[in-house]
């Protein structure tokens, strides 16, 4: 009888665990969502209407022309002080978990490309990142969402720095001391790729530990820059080669480049003797 009771209890615990698992999956927020402009806490003022119009153009998914976006941005620049005040209000009024909406407000600020938004963007990059709330960071990460918002703000500062704004350049240098690895890498890349970026090399290295100097050398690469092995199992030594797969033929010494990346032939690896 006691074994039967234990069996029932174990079954109930398993059932509860399964129900909790599915409930958590159902509550996992999406990383991609449209920004619901109508639900943003935007004032019904001239600045609020301009911001709402731009967000609707940029994120509604409707068919809009580039001219309409440019016109709206120019109108925001003409009313810069009140628009920036409204952006500050909206960003600080949005719920923390509304990551898409917060990112959209930051994106709107970066499109102004004005030194006046530097303080706003600087505060966002420097703001502390809340602790991870996700129970499965491989599926969804709140820290990653927070980093994405700060990376967008940093990109706005990079644009100002590229336009020879010294305060923006100094901000990028100060970001090299942040605790976020992603932001330190982004700041390093932003500084080294400025028009006079090589002049910043020593300055970057002075701010980073020696183990992180490689941040400067990181480069983006296209998939086309890498060769593709069409017979990945054909180049293995015979004991490991799959049946009916021919070895990869060696590259001819006089072969001329065809314009596409190729993989040079590798020597056949020596197979260690089998120990009996």
Image: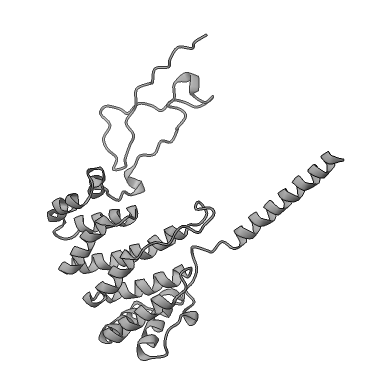
Report the residue that reaches farthest toward the right.
1
Compared to residue 181, the image places residue 227 above or below, namely above
Q: Residue at x 39, y 86 (%)?
A: 48
In this picture the colour scheme is: one colour
Numbered circles on residues, count: 0
In this picture, is 115 found above or below 254?
Answer: below
The residue positioned farthest toward the top in the image shown: 276
Residue 100, image x, y percentages: 45, 69
Residue shown at 26%/56% (left/top)?
A: 177
Q: Is residue 164 visible?
A: no
| Residue at position x 38%, y 74% in the image | 105
Residue 158 percent coordinates (x, y): 24, 64
Residue 181 in view in this figure: yes
User: Residue 125, position in %: x, y?
Assistant: 32, 65
Q: Nearer the viewer, residue 28 or 271?
A: 28
Tell which of 70 and 37 is nearer to you.
37
Side (left or right) of 29 relative to 101? right
Tell me if 222 is positioned left or right of 216 in this view. Answer: right
Indicate the quadrant containing the N terminus: top left, top right, bottom left or bottom right. Answer: top right
**Quarter of the view holding residue 150:** bottom left
> What x and y, as percent, mark residue 161?
20, 66
Residue located at (50% from left, 51% from top)? 138
Q: Nearer the viewer, residue 218 or 94?
A: 94
Residue 10 falls left or right of residue 134:
right
Residue furthest front as drawn: 2
Give the quarter of the image for residue 268.
Answer: top left
Q: Relative to residue 226, is residue 29 depicted above or below?
A: below
């Amino acid at each position: 009888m006691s074994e039967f009771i234990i069996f029932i209890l174990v079954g109930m615990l398993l059932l509860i665990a399964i129900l909790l698992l599915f409930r958590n999956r159902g509550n996992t927020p999406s990383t991609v969502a449209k920004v619901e402009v109508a639900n943003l806490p935007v004032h019904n003022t001239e600045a609020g209407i301009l911001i709402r119009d731009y967000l609707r153009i940029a994120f509604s998914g409707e068919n809009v022309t580039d001219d309409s976006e440019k016109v709206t941005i120019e109108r925001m620049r003409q009313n810069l002080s009140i628009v920036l005040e409204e952006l500050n209000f909206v960003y600080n009024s949005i719920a923390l978990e509304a990551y898409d909406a917060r990112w959209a407000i930051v994106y709107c600020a970066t499109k102004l490309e004005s030194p006046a938004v530097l303080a706003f963007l600087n505060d966002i990059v420097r703001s502390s990142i809340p602790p991870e709330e996700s129970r499965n960071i491989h599926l969804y990460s709140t820290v990653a969402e927070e980093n994405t918002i700060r990376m967008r703000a940093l990109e706005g500062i990079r644009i100002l720095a590229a336009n020879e704004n010294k305060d923006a350049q100094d901000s990028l240098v100060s970001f090299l001391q942040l605790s976020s690895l992603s932001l330190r890498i982004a700041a390093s890349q932003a500084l080294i790729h400025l028009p006079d970026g090589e002049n910043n090399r020593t300055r970057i290295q002075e701010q980073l530990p020696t183990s992180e100097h490689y941040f400067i050398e990181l480069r983006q690469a296209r998939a086309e820059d890498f060769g593709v092995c069409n017979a990945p199992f054909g180049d293995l030594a015979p004991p490991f080669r799959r049946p009916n797969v021919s070895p990869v033929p060696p590259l001819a010494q006089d072969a001329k480049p065809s314009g596409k990346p190729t993989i040079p032939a590798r020597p056949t690896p020596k197979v260690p003797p089998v120990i009996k």
